Image (cartoon, coloured by chain):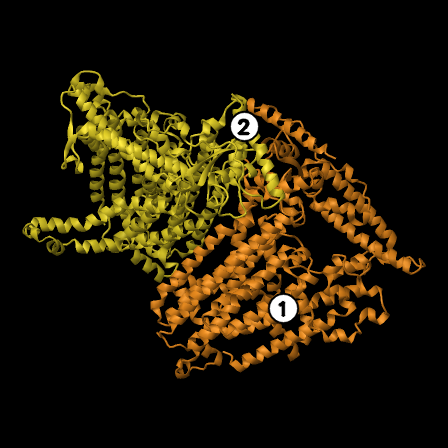
Chain colours: A orange, B yellow
């Protein structure tokens, strides 16, 4: 265990690192040269102009106004200054709700820390257990529960504190849930008209021998939602086309670059290039001509592919975006069961158009359940056995292995320094690489599972990442050994011993976790604001690669909030805070500082840097809430285990009440607030519809929705630099407004009336369209 | 362990008992005297007349046709004869689906038993382990897995069999789920128009200072379901009134009796009675006058109470039955979220009128969650600690205690015979009484939890009863000791030891469970068909109490399927069958005989005896399915534990796959079939609406629904023997068709448009009513 002076040293070093980062940031951000790195959001919004285009030459790159260096911390109040409603307008509700996670951390831990320091620290401190025990101990241990003699009555303090902390946490959680649910509903109610409010995604349209998917969808909804159905957009399998379009985009970019170069050289010398790998080998050709011909070739191919997609029914996936005349109609359709077979005609709210993950729209129901099984098994093995392949790689990557594989390096490897570096670094590298690509692996798993929106994918990955971290970082640090060894131990231990084993080693790991918080939390957050990687990459790209203005825009790489990695990280701090609150309260100030710093930094980043990818209106809050509750229950169980080793057995029955109450609280919150995140109340929909009808009586919803859910490749294909690829928008198959049913009438009366039903509605539809 | 000859003897005795019951039944049922006991359903349907009213005097009571005695088993083919669709018409879908539980048992266990006897019995039998072990063993043990030597390769047979049994069970379960879901949907689609198809129950109507519940409900639904809302019926708190009406009913019955007596005596002597307890003491009065005056008094009171209920808003509960013009509208409202606060305006399908549990309609949301917590805790204690109060009562009920409490019995208690009887019987009685009232306790718990229909109450109680039986009968028999001792053991055992402990003692308990099946299963079912209790009670009542024809009808007491006790009992047999299938296959034939016998007996009872209380269209099947899956998983885990004691460790990883696959199968079925039992697809609703519109274009749904959901006491009050209690139906407050809103317009536009919205709809409503 580290002594308190060591901890002090570590704290000092980390504080210095963090301050160094902050100072570096304060200096770098006011250099015009870095403007696009630190304020990309304003560029993307079109609210900021390039400082490079005005002023004296030196001032273009370096800030010479020395007064601005004196105010180097003024970004902090600026970050806190923007009020919440304005922030929602500026960066979306998701960002604001994400910030509220940090705020929740502050709300929970600041009072808990104060209480712990006024009540528990004196109670722990005024004992002489450790001094009498002849064990080595530190000042930190004297502040912790370890300093209380076995069987002491002082444990009642910890019991009462555990109750207080639980009730306070639940109170804060309940208030936050309430506020965020209200914010979400207000946001949904007050925001602009959005296509997803009117649209429902239908999946697993059953195959029909008589009708195409297009006709089938139309008939089904005309019959079953006669008064509300407006139009629909079938989903095409356009992944190959998408690849082609991307390829052409790259080539077009190169063409622009060479054209620019040629023009800049006063059209004296036509640029040339090699056709081989990375332009390093192959035949030397005229660059402009080469790219021109390549683009033409691709355009033709794209043309053909598009035609194929529109003509052949093979490319139509059994899914469609169905739009309704009113939000009420869409809310009804999204929340109800359509068919007697619950695996076909599955309806759900359409995600925002930019949130759709197109590749997964056509996975059938049976396949979905099988995929879920496969991923569940795979994730289990990933979590508990990931060390096996890494250990295998590590065993390969030793000196002997390298010598065997590459005999020519033998001379080099005989140098002692090189050997020790390799032996010191290599084993760690495999693990490090794995941890870096872990979020991507988890994301791939979620994609394989078949979720249809990016937001759900991220939420799912976050859940998995949290579980992985909980088992491999939290438990793995407390009980050393691989996750599989732990699992094996737990299986062979009795149920009441597990919390005891973990609980007993908790106080001993406090110093480790304090260091962890400072390194990963403090320095990590300070590093986030410095944006070292984007800064370096931007300048590198700007120097070497940026060919056109578009390239420069792309080089900015504003990034976005990465919920799938960021949120599980925060949750680890909630877990540490709650677990240690009643055990080693000295850890709490470190947690509080983390939350405070992170709140300011991320608020700044959200205002100035991050570019929002999608808007889910805070749909992730139930997950956040659930994980804090999990942390609370874990902390209660571990405290129970710890106290039972301290022979404070009379308190165990009282502590059992806490998890029961917490679980009940969770269920209460789930019933009370979660529906606001899952369903869309009809009252809201009706209110918004009525308002809209009053304000814009002649709104043509159909026109508004027409192209909202077309695969981006069809939208983008024409938009990219205005290239005409031979297929105009008009040629794109419009949804027919009247499709006569081809189905031969099998039943007598219902089919009859269904058809009359549908014609009646069609009249309505066309009626509405007569509105100017 | 009992020897095989002992088992043979027990089997013989139980078979004889069962046959004796069946013969007794065959003789008793053809006596005209007992006709009402064995065929009450036909009387209730009005399809059978009293044989007492015709024929010779003796033939009225005793069947003298000796040929009919020869065909004494012909009720069996008769019971099997009625085809399923006709049975649905005759007894409702619930009964038919209930029978299918037995059928599922046969489908699962007959092939499993055949396979086990052809494959596993030879494999087990051809070993000499038990003979060499010098342990005492029986022939039954020689057939079981105990006879296979430790670490033998023969365990692969059991492994393969476990896979086969699992796949076969899952296959049967899937097919049954499929069939029953189709039956349910067909039943719902093809049946008569029913009020609950059009009606939604709204609970937790929020309090409003400006409007009454009545007005509030109307306005809310006129605004939010403008095209579909038809009418509504608020719920009154009429429990006191209900008591009064019941009291008057009893008194009326006595009045009828005395009137009849007076008339039969040729009006010579007016009957008199005493007013005290049970007519045994008190003043002697003229009976007819007395009851006449009592009834008059009660009628006045009822009148006053009704007036109070209709006038005072205190009696209006914040709940209402809202009816829609179409099934589509009701389906939409039942499946969607109404308000942004998910704890108010809770909508769900209205249960059938006779299925409503009126007392629970007004429990607010927060109270509901608290009630659930209380009941969860209470049930936990009931399951694990029920032995404590019983042991306490037992300790009181010993000889010394009785002598102390009642010294006058001292003389009697000195007789040795009496003492031994008391000591032998008393301790058991407390437990027996507890077990008899246990279903009622569980039902009370469910009622306290706040479910609003009798069918849900029964389903919930069944779940609890199953858990109780699983822990206290199944586990309690295998590992002797109270449930709490088991729990304590399990907590102190490691997770992988629990299945080992239980699994290892399973083969030893086979003979016990075989006896259990014969006593509880075979004899129980045979006793069920004999209806001993109703038979005795009917004749007792008929002799002593029956005063009027109505009394005789009530004395019949047809009973009904008691899902809350019957289904958990069957599930115990599923559990035993699946657990022992791979361990001691000799148990399987006993299970098969049980299922076969029970199927025939209950089919007969359903056709001839039981009177259906409500119709839930087989809504309980997901529970049944889930519990069979649970049994399957338990059997797999226990087999795993058992095999690991047999040092067949190489098979453990292969066995772990089974529960994973089974859980996945359960999730698949849940997604695939459960929605058919929970939600009502819009396609079905629309189809049925369209058909109905075509067939009866001028149907007045409003009139049809008007009194469907009036509290039964208001309906019954007037119906009972046509007594006019002074309040005619017309005086009963009709739902106003147009209620002007009293709310002052707080917001400007929305309220405005809401109001115009509602007036528009009201016009529609009145429009429709102009239809003849």
Question: Mark 1 falls on what kind of element?
Answer: helix
Q: Which residue is mark 2?
A: B766
Quadrant position of residue B317: top left
Give the structural element (helix, strand or loop) at label 2. helix
Q: Position of residue A434 (x, y in %)?
A: 60, 63
User: Where does residue B132 sit, x and y in percent of width and height?
Assistant: 26, 54
Looking at the image, which residue is at 44% across and 34% down? B180
Q: Report in which chain the residue with disc 2 lies.
A: B
- Name the residue: 39% across, 69% down: A643
Identify the residue position indicated by label 1 in the image.
A525
Q: Is residue B521 left or right of residue A368?
A: left
- The picture places residue B136, in percent across and down from the top left corner, at 22, 52
Q: Residues within 10 Å of mark 1 (few under 14, many from 20)?
A: many
Q: Nearer the viewer, residue A633 or B251?
A: B251
What percent of the width, then of the height, locates residue A619? 58, 52
**Viewer-proximal residue among A277 and B333:** B333
């Amino acid at each position: 265990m580290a002594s308190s002076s060591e901890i002090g040293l570590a704290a000092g070093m980390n504080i210095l690192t963090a301050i160094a980062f902050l100072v570096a940031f304060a200096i770098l951000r006011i250099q015009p040269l870095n403007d696009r790195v630190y304020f990309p959001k304003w560029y993307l919004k079109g609210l900021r102009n390039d400082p490079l285009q005005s002023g004296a030459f030196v001032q273009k790159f370096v800030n010479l106004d020395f007064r601005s260096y004196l105010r180097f911390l003024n970004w902090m109040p600026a970050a806190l200054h923007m009020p919440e409603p304005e922030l929602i307008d500026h960066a979306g509700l998701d960002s604001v709700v994400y910030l509220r996670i940090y705020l929740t951390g502050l709300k929970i831990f600041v009072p808990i820390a104060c209480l712990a320091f006024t009540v528990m620290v004196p109670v722990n401190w005024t004992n002489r257990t450790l001094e009498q025990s002849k064990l080595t101990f530190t000042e930190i241990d004297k502040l912790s529960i370890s300093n209380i003699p076995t069987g002491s009555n002082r444990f009642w303090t910890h019991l009462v504190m555990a109750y207080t902390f639980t009730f306070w946490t639940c109170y804060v959680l309940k208030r936050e849930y309430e506020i965020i649910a209200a914010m979400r509903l207000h946001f949904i109610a007050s925001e602009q008209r959005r296509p997803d409010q009117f649209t429902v995604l239908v999946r697993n349209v059953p195959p029909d021998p008589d009708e195409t998917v297009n006709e089938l969808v139309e008939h089904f909804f005309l019959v079953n939602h006669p008064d509300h159905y407006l139009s629909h957009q079938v989903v095409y399998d356009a992944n190959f086309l998408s690849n082609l379009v991307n390829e052409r985009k790259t080539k077009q970019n190169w063409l622009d670059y060479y054209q620019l170069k040629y023009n800049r050289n006063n059209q004296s010398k036509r640029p040339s290039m090699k056709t081989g790998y990375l332009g390093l080998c192959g035949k030397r050709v005229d660059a402009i001509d080469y790219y021109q011909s390549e683009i033409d070739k691709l355009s033709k191919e794209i043309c053909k592919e598009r035609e194929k997609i529109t003509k052949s029914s093979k490319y139509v996936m059994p899914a469609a975006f169905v739009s309704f005349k009113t939000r009420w109609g869409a809310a009804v359709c999204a929340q109800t069961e359509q068919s007697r077979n619950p695996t076909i005609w599955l309806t759900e709210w359409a995600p925002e158009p930019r949130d759709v993950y197109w590749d997964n729209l056509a996975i059938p129901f049976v396949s979905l359940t099988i995929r879920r099984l496969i991923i569940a098994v795979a994730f289990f093995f990933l979590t508990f056995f990931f060390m096996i392949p890494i250990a295998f790689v590590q065993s390969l990557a030793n000196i002997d292995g390298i010598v065997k594989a590459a005999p020519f390096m033998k001379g080099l490897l005989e140098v002692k320094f090189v050997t020790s570096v390799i032996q010191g670094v290599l084993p760690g590298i495999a693990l490090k690489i794995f941890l870096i690509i872990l979020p991507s692996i988890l994301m791939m798993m979620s994609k394989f599972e078949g979720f249809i929106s990016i937001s759900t994918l991220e939420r799912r990955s976050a859940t998995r990442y949290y579980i992985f971290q909980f088992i491999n970082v939290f438990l793995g640090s407390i009980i050393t050994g691989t996750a599989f060894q732990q699992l094996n131990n737990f299986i062979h231990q009795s149920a009441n011993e597990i919390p005891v084993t973990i609980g007993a080693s908790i106080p001993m790991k406090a110093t480790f976790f304090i260091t962890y918080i400072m390194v990963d939390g403090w320095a990590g957050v300070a590093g986030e604001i410095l944006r070292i990687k984007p800064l370096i990459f931007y300048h590198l790209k700007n120097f070497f690669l940026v060919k056109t203005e578009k390239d420069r825009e792309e080089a900015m790489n504003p990034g976005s909030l990465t919920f799938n990695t960021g949120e599980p990280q925060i949750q680890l701090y909630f877990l540490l805070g709650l677990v240690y609150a009643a055990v080693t309260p000295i850890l709490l100030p470190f947690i509080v500082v983390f939350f405070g710093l992170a709140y300011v930094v991320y608020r700044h980043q959200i205002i100035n840097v991050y570019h929002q990818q999608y808007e889910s209106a805070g749909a992730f809050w139930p997950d956040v809430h659930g994980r804090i509750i999990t942390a609370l229950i874990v902390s209660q169980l571990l405290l129970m285990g710890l106290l039972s080793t301290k022979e404070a057995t009379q308190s165990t029955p009282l502590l059992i009440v806490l998890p029961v109450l917490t679980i009940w609280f969770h269920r209460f919150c789930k019933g009370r607030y979660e529906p606001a995140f899952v369903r869309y109340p009809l009252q809201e929909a009706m209110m918004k519809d009525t308002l809209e009808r009053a304000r814009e009586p002649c709104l043509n919803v159909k026109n508004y929705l027409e192209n909202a859910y077309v695969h981006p490749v069809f939208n983008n294909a024409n938009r990219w630099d205005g290239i005409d690829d031979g297929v105009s928008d008009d040629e794109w198959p419009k949804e027919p407004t009247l499709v006569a049913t081809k189905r031969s009438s099998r039943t007598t009366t219902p089919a009859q009336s269904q058809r009359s039903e549908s014609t009646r509605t069609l009249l309505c539809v066309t009626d509405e369209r007569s509105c100017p």
